[in-house]
Image: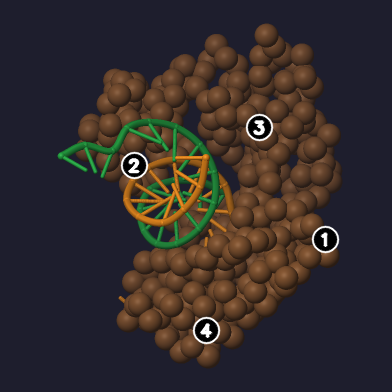
Chain colours: A brown, B orange, C green
Amino acid sequence: MAQHIILHLDMDYFYAQIEERDNPTLKGKPVVVCMVSAREGSLGAIATCNYEARKLGLHAGMPCFLAKTKAPHGVYIPARREYYTMVSDSIMEALRGYADTLEQVSVDEAYMDVSTKVSGYEGLIEYVKAIKDSVLKRENLTCSIGAGPNKLIAKMASKVNKPDGYKIIPPAEVDSFIISQPVSKILGVGEKTQEKLAELGIRTVADLRNLNRDELTREFGQGRGKLLYESARGEDESQVVERVKEQYGRLASLKRDSRDTEEMNALIDSLTSDVHSRLLKNNMAYKTVSTTFVLENMETKTKSRTLQAKTQNLDVLRTTAKGLLREFLAENPTLIRRLGVTASGLAPSAGQKSITDY
DNA sequence: TCTGGGGTCCTAGGACCC
DNA sequence: TCTGGGGTCCTAGGACCC
């Protein structure tokens, strides 16, 4: 049975690196790419920043007004998402030829199963270097690559020598590699799980190994329990698979917290147009519509409705989303901060069908 | 004086069907 | 008086990721 060789490729500080590439005078300065919303008085939040900015304590998700107090000389650039997506598509295309299967995880990240492309871990360094080189030649951008016998190890390895580096973990080194990691590095262990683990006295993967399967499923449920048990042993059976989009959604902030139906319906018009154009572009139909409400206190609520049959129709999307908004307002007295619309239950569109599907 | 936007996966209860 | 068990779909929410 041939061994699996999985790579995880991660573009370095992707959005900010693209901005640096396009404007070399930015090199050496803290570069901060911001997501800007329509909200009055808001400077938005950081999407990505380069390493100079990180040294000053900046990180993704940080509000930009706060970033500006820490890095007043930084260069703040509004995100150009469509452009970054084009760059991403070009990179993914370049990677495809190097992989048996390519699984794009996000704009700047992909898993590659290269099991039949290389003869083993011996020749892997050259192969990894060739991939990094092709990305550099194609888009003049650097990336980092991790390699190992499964996705978990590849992903953790890609972080080891960032930026512009690589790390290969052959099967014999998996155990010593994984056991040295803090639990927070395990994929799927976020803030909440970390807190709960800390209460149980668990901080490292080595600690985690002291709990057996039953204890973990009792504490964390079937899914997360299994994940923790296997991850602690460097095991991950999940395969690299070509991803199919399961939903298209758009979310945006209101100018100010509101219950103004007219304003919100107008926003829904614009959000649904966007979602709809992506459905058309990919020739997909949807069956379920969800409206997302982010409240004053940042709490998120959703309401959804599944149709009798799938459709591609824009008016149905709009009417359903607005209906859900009306219901939500009738049931909840709270002000709304952000609104979102998502189409899910996607399937390839049958072609000429339209309103009659409803 | 605040805190963006786009996703995936899992869980759980109820409806409904065989 | 007692009334199984399994599967699928729908809705809602939570955790996590970039």
Alpha carbon separation for disc pair 1 and 3: 30 Å
Mark number for residue A264?
4
Q: Secondary structure at mark 1?
A: loop
Q: Are marks 1 and 2 on the same chain?
A: yes
Rendering quarter of residue A275: bottom right
Q: Earlier in the sequence, mark 3 or mark 2?
A: 2
Q: Residue at x 62, y 29 (%)?
A: A239
Instruction: Please give the chain letter of the residue carrying mark 3.
Output: A
| Residue bearing the label numbered 1 | A351
Q: Are marks 1 and 3 in contact (CB under 8 Å)?
A: no
Question: From the viewer's perspective, is the residue at label 3 or at label 2 nearer?
Answer: 3
Q: Earlier in the sequence, mark 3 or mark 4?
A: 3
Rendering quarter of residue A166: top right
The kind of residue tagged 2 is Thr
Residue B4, image x, y percentages: 52, 70
Instruction: Please give the chain letter of the residue carrying mark 2.
Output: A
The kind of residue tagged 4 is Met
Alpha carbon separation for disc pair 3 and 4: 40 Å
Quadrant of the image for the C terminus of chain A?
bottom right
Q: Earlier in the sequence, mark 1 or mark 2?
A: 2
Alpha carbon separation for disc pair 4 and 2: 36 Å
Q: Earlier in the sequence, mark 1 or mark 4?
A: 4
Q: Earlier in the sequence, mark 1 or mark 3?
A: 3
The kind of residue tagged 1 is Gly
| Residue bearing the label numbered 2 | A193
Instruction: Please give the chain letter of the residue carrying mark 1.
Output: A
Residue A295, image x, y percentages: 39, 73
| Residue bearing the label numbered 3 | A240
Of residue A138 and residue A235, the one placed in the foreground of this image is A235
In this view, A289 is above or below A52: below
Rendering quarter of residue A118: top right
